[in-house]
Image (cartoon, rainbow, N blue to C red):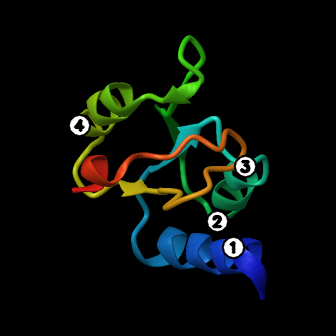
Amino acid sequence: MSGTGALRILAEFLGKFAPAPIYVSDPTWGNHIAIFGKGGLEVRKYRYFDKSTNGFDFEGMCEDLKKAPAGSHILLHTCAHNPTGADPIMEQWV
């Protein structure tokens, strides 16, 4: 089925049974916005990549996600963030 197929099924499920905005990283893999949009979800972005450091923007991500309405969905890349390759360190996951 692949990751894309799994996300498409998730988008349909969430759109039907738990409609709420979904937050994706900025940037994210190119097809994520279309997949969740086709599932009927409003796609919003959270900061992820800091161009000035070429690294993960932990503070920006936390700040943006704290503003997300209750019940929102959040898409997280657990490792090997695509397309940046910038990942949180272990302490940031805790």
Q: Secondary structure at mark 1?
A: helix
Sooner in the amino-acid sequence: mark 4 or mark 1:
1
Choose between 90 and 27: the one closer to the eye.
90
Farthest residue toward the bottom?
1
Total tally of numbered discs in the picture: 4
Q: Residues within 10 Å of mark 2 (few under 14, many from 20)?
A: some
Q: CA distance from mark 1 to mark 2?
A: 7 Å
Which quadrant is the N terminus positioned in?
Answer: bottom right
Residue 8 - label: 1
Sooner in the amino-acid sequence: mark 3 or mark 4:
3
Q: Residues within 10 Å of mark 3 (few under 14, many from 20)?
A: some
44 to 91, vertically: above or below: above
Horizontal relation, residue 18 to residue 59: left or right: right
Farthest residue toward the front?
90
Horizontal relation, residue 72 to residue 2: left or right: left
Name the amino acid type tagged 1. Arg
Sooner in the amino-acid sequence: mark 3 or mark 2:
3
Residue 29 - label: 3
73 to 54, vertically: above or below: below
Q: Are marks 1 and 2 in contact (CB under 8 Å)?
A: yes
Pointer 2 residue: 39
Pointer 4 residue: 66
Sooner in the amino-acid sequence: mark 1 or mark 2:
1
**Which is closer to the viewer, label 4 or label 2?**
4
Name the spot of residue 29 as percent of width and height, x first.
Answer: 72, 49
Q: CA distance from mark 4 to mark 1?
A: 26 Å
Q: Secondary structure at mark 3?
A: loop
Choose between 84 and 76: the one closer to the eye.
84
Q: CA distance from mark 3 to mark 4?
A: 23 Å
Q: Secondary structure at mark 2?
A: loop
Name the spot of residue 16 as percent of width and height, x first.
Answer: 51, 75
Name the amino acid type tagged 3. Trp
